[in-house]
């Protein structure tokens, strides 16, 4: 499935570029930052790009081992096989990263390109989260909902390790507090990508509502109750128009009934 999807993506991208550029060859995306000031080394699961003579260069062996260890935990937790290597760009500082990638964020993933990037002082904490986005994309499917993809990345990348106990995590403490404060969003609010993005985009709202954490609580409880296989199916098939029906078909109950179970779980967590 991984290879088929990659072939289709490259074919579609090539077709789009061919059409827009008016050339008759298939173009493959060039992976890289805006400059070519990179050293490259390979680990078992990553191509690591880093600035020459940087702090990263000094610690590269340790970072390699750390990222590979995290990678193995992700594929084990998701019970998937991921054959390719992920390209990981490690900028020397936050300023270097934000300038190089023309972004205001502190790390991000380009799942289609199997690329993640960040900067030296946070790459060890963010690489796992970003790698979940890439690995899930190629092994589970293209997720149409930010709350599901971020919930999974937050849960697997930041919190559930190493217990693999989806129902026992600090994200549920966060969910319980948000519920008590009247800040736990409804599923239909979470499923509104534009609303979710607005919440996350505002520092104030992000701190108040913690949208990634409450999404991780939802995802963790869903997987904890009904297993990974059904979650993967729901994750890949659900879209804005069908997610309530897909949920009912997948889980044999309405998403509203499950939402009530989730709230009850949090109340007594
Ligand atoms: Zn993310």
Image (spheres, helix red, strand yellow):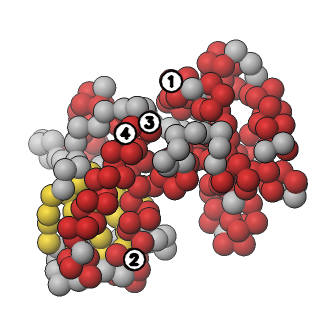
Q: Label 4 vs label 1: CA separation?
A: 14 Å
Tell me whether circle 4 and circle 2 mark residues in contact (CB < 8 Å): no
The circle drawn on residue 229 is 1
Q: Residues within 10 Å of mark 1 (few under 14, many from 20)?
A: some
**Of the pair 77 and 127, the residue shown nearer to us:** 77
Q: Label 3 vs label 2: CA separation?
A: 27 Å
Point out the tag, 2 or 1, that comes first from the N-terminus: 2
User: Residue under circle 3?
Assistant: 78
Point out the tag, 3 or 1, that comes first from the N-terminus: 3
Tell me whether circle 4 and circle 3 mark residues in contact (CB < 8 Å): yes
SS type, badge 3: helix
User: Residue under circle 4?
Assistant: 75
Quadrant (top left, top right, bottom left, bottom right) of the C terminus:
top right
User: Residue under circle 2?
Assistant: 121
Estimate the x, y position of residue 207 in percent, counting from the top left: 70, 68
Estimate the x, y position of residue 53 in percent, counting from the top left: 17, 84
**Of the pair 224 and 240, the residue shown nearer to us:** 224
Point out the tag, 4 or 2, that comes first from the N-terminus: 4
**Of the pair 232 and 12, the residue shown nearer to us:** 232
Tell me whether circle 3 and circle 1 mark residues in contact (CB < 8 Å): no
């Amino acid at each position: 499935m991984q290879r088929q999807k990659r072939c289709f993506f490259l074919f579609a991208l090539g077709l789009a570029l061919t059409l827009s550029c008016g050339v008759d060859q298939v173009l493959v995306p060039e992976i890289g930052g805006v400059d070519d000031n990179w050293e490259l080394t390979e680990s078992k699961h990553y191509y690591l790009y880093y600035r020459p003579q940087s702090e990263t260069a000094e610690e590269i062996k340790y970072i390699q081992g750390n990222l590979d260890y995290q990678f193995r935990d992700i594929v084990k937790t998701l019970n998937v096989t991921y054959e390719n290597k992920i390209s990981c760009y490690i900028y020397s500082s936050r300023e270097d990263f934000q300038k190089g990638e023309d972004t205001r964020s502190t790390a991000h993933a380009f799942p289609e390109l199997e690329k993640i990037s960040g900067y030296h002082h946070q790459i060890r904490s963010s690489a796992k989260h970003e790698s979940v986005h890439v690995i899930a994309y190629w092994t589970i499917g293209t997720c149409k909902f930010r709350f599901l993809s971020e919930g999974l990345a937050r849960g697997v990348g930041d919190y559930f390790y190493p217990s693999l106990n989806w129902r026992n995590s600090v994200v549920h403490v966060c969910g319980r507090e948000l519920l008590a404060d009247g800040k736990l969003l409804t599923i239909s609010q979470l499923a509104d990508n534009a609303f979710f993005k607005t919440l996350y985009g505002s520092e104030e709202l992000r701190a108040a509502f913690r949208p990634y954490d409450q999404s991780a609580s939802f995802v963790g409880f869903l997987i904890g109750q009904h297993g990974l296989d059904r979650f993967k199916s729901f994750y890949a098939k659900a879209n804005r128009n069908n997610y309530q029906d897909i949920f009912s078909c997948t889980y044999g109950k309405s998403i509203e009934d499950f939402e009530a179970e989730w709230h009850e779980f949090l109340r007594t967590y």
